[in-house]
Amino acid sequence: MTGITVAVVAKECLPGKVKTRLTPALSPEGAARVAAASLADTLATVSALPAARRVLFYDGDLLPEGAAGFDVLHQPGGGLDERLGFLFDTVQEPLLLVGMDTPQVSVDALAPVFDGAERDAWFGPAEDGGFWSLFMRRPDGDLIRGVPMSQDDTGAVQLGRLRSAGLDTGLLAELLDVDTLPDAERVAALAPTTRFAAALADESATTPGGVR
């Protein structure tokens, strides 16, 4: 089988544009630094995977730390479902999507995809009802377009799409997305040696009352 392409979907970490739910506990600049650290952790993990190709599916201009070795594919306009649909139509080989909001993700968490890549699909559910990872052996954007994003049933709808299409779908471990400050604190405790945890600790030192 053709080797797996791993794509990280990400946006440029600009103050006021990323992790806005971490404010006002953190400043917009602090939230952007925490987001950048989360992305750097994710890119480092993906760089350690036995992937045939790595893609940064990017909304932005200035490339992030750790992007060396990644092919850059710029995101088109439209809703997230449309953008992901574009990605899954553009990449022809088996495709594993990973988000930038789970800095605790590890090589071990993604190993089932590489160990069981003969399956039609793999799905990584997020604790908030979304999903943090998605694999299709034969990428098909039509299986993503129309899925309502950023809702508590997003993951259930997406998983239902895969199964309704008759795809043999495996489940990865459920992970917590970093959206709010309590999320960030929990993830930092789960992965204390990450860049993300260090960045969050730095912000606690410069933002009084920002991190408990």
Image: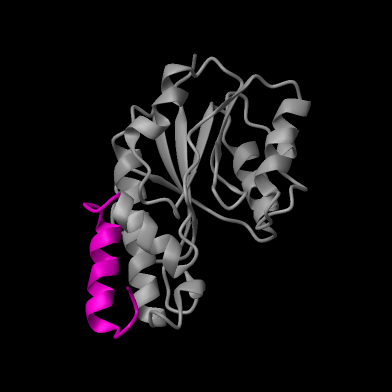
Q: Residue extending furthest front?
A: 212
Q: Residue at x 70, y 51 (%)?
A: 82
Query: Is 32 placed above or below 79 here?
Result: below
- Can residue 20 be seen? yes
**In which quadrant of the rendered view does residue 86 lie?**
top right
* Front position in the image: 81 or 206: 206
Which quadrant of the figure has residue 156? Answer: top right
Q: Is residue 169 above or below residue 27?
A: above
Is residue 150 within the magenta segment? Answer: no
Tell how many labels. 0
Q: Is residue 12 visible?
A: no
Where does residue 75 sit, x and y in percent of width and height? 57, 55
Residue located at (28% from left, 75% from top): 203
Q: Residue at x 69, y 60 (%)?
A: 78
Q: How is the image coloured?
A: one colour
Reply yes or no: does residue 195 show up in magenta.
yes
Q: Position of residue 172 (x, y in %)?
A: 50, 32
Quarter assignment of residue 149? bottom right
Left or right relative to 79: residue 11: left
Q: Position of residue 170 (x, y in %)?
A: 57, 24
Q: Residue 62 appears at what percent x and percent y?
A: 38, 66
Residue displayed at 74% across by 20% down: 166
- Compared across the picture, whether 9 is left or right of 62 comes to right
| Magenta-tinted stretch | 191-212
If the image is split into quadrants, where does the C terminus sit?
Answer: bottom left
The one of 136 and 110 positioned closer to us in this rendering:
110
